[in-house]
Amino acid sequence: MVYRLTLLPLLLGSLLLGQSNPATQPDQAAYTPQELARLIRQYGDELTDIDVEVTPAMEAKAIEACKAFRYAAKNPPAGPALDGLNRVGIRAGFAAGDPAVMLEGAKLRWQGEKDKHTDYTAYALVWAGIFAGDAAQAKIGLDYLAHGPTEPLREWAQQMLPLAADCAKPLDASFSALDGSNVSLSRYRGRVVVMFFWAVWCKPSLEQVPAMKAFHAQRKADGNFLLVGLSMDDSSQTALTGARDLGMKWPQAMNQNLREKFSSGNFVPHVVVLSPAGTVIWQGHPVIKNVLAMTVDFARRQAARQAGLPAGIATSLAAVSAPASAPTAAISVSRPATRPGVSEDDAFAAEQKLKIANMYLKNGMKDRARTVLMEIVQKYPNTPAGQKAAEALLQLR
């Protein structure tokens, strides 16, 4: 092992020569007016609308569209191209996991409508504002919907107003894992956290378990995603037994106070979604699956962009099968062992990135795997995953 580590700096030097991570490079794109007009029309037609599933190919295209949008925002096109710019911003920002672009697109559309606003524009402004942590813009859209002509949207907007008011504030809370340890949500910054409140005594929450299991199975391979079960039962033993019997193979914890931040009384089943920044971006009944999936998957794409991962990783990882794991008794047991002088958070982050690299390797994507492996070795050289990444790089030479 000492011999291999002495080769590592030379190996990294040869691998890094002439290479850069495109995710960290500033936009250098420049377009002629004709090309910009063509791209705006093309992206406006080809990109998916919000509330629709995003494919890896669509995500990659949306990232390119965001570059065109940012250029056009600084160099506004004339004529019909300007009219279609807001549509591109909303759709590209949503599909790329870029809340800033989505919000700018929604604001352009809202301003362009003047006094003839539509439910769609207000709805897009609400989501873009919440995703971007802009409470003022989210409130503009919610105020319109809360007094608008569509009854279901009026009720929805009234329920969302309290959430939107705090959309810029990370949730500062902790709860007790089933092994008795205390877990703070701040340790999961950078990941999308879904908290599923449930109880053995609550039949409606038990009825939602199969749907949550399917939801978890589709996303568990993504290191940017974490589902946590929060039991409202009277004892940890009841919760642990119930989780095992029901096959809930994700971390479980108990809490009798965290629910008070969202609602009073017995409100299970209930789901709360936290963005990579730790802000609450959605809460509600898990039966509203399309909204839950839309919110979680947008935040996963956002987390992937912030982590500098290649286009498509946040959506493609859901299709990669991962080996089933035993039911997790507590959150803390899922974190890897650490070595002296290595923080638990660094060890955990390195382990998650190593899983992503291994998935790339299994699918024959060696260049992407090499990029992730180099990042692990550079950032976390003294972790167990860092050593494994170094060995994997040697084998890829």
Image (cartoon, rainbow, N blue to C red):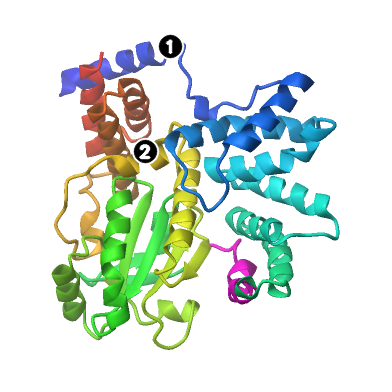
Residue at image coords 34%, 77%:
255
For the record, the magenta segment spans 154-170
Q: Nearer the viewer, residue 13 or 191?
A: 191
Q: Is residue 163 magenta?
A: yes
* Image position of 70 with respect to 13: above or below: below
Q: Which residue is mark 2?
A: 316
The spot of residue 393 in percent (x, y) is: 26, 21
User: Which quadrant, please, contains the C terminus?
Assistant: top left
Q: Quadrant of residue 323?
A: top left
Q: Which residue is mark 1?
A: 17
The spot of residue 215 in percent (x, y) is: 32, 57
* Image position of 125 with respect to 237: above or below: above
Judged by its main secondary structure, the magenta piece is: helix
Q: Nearer the viewer, mark 1 or mark 2?
A: 2
What amino acid type is highlighted by mark number 2? Answer: Ser
Residue at image coords 28%, 79%:
199
* Image position of 395 with respect to 153: above or below: above
Which label's residue is closer to the chain start, 1 or 2?
1
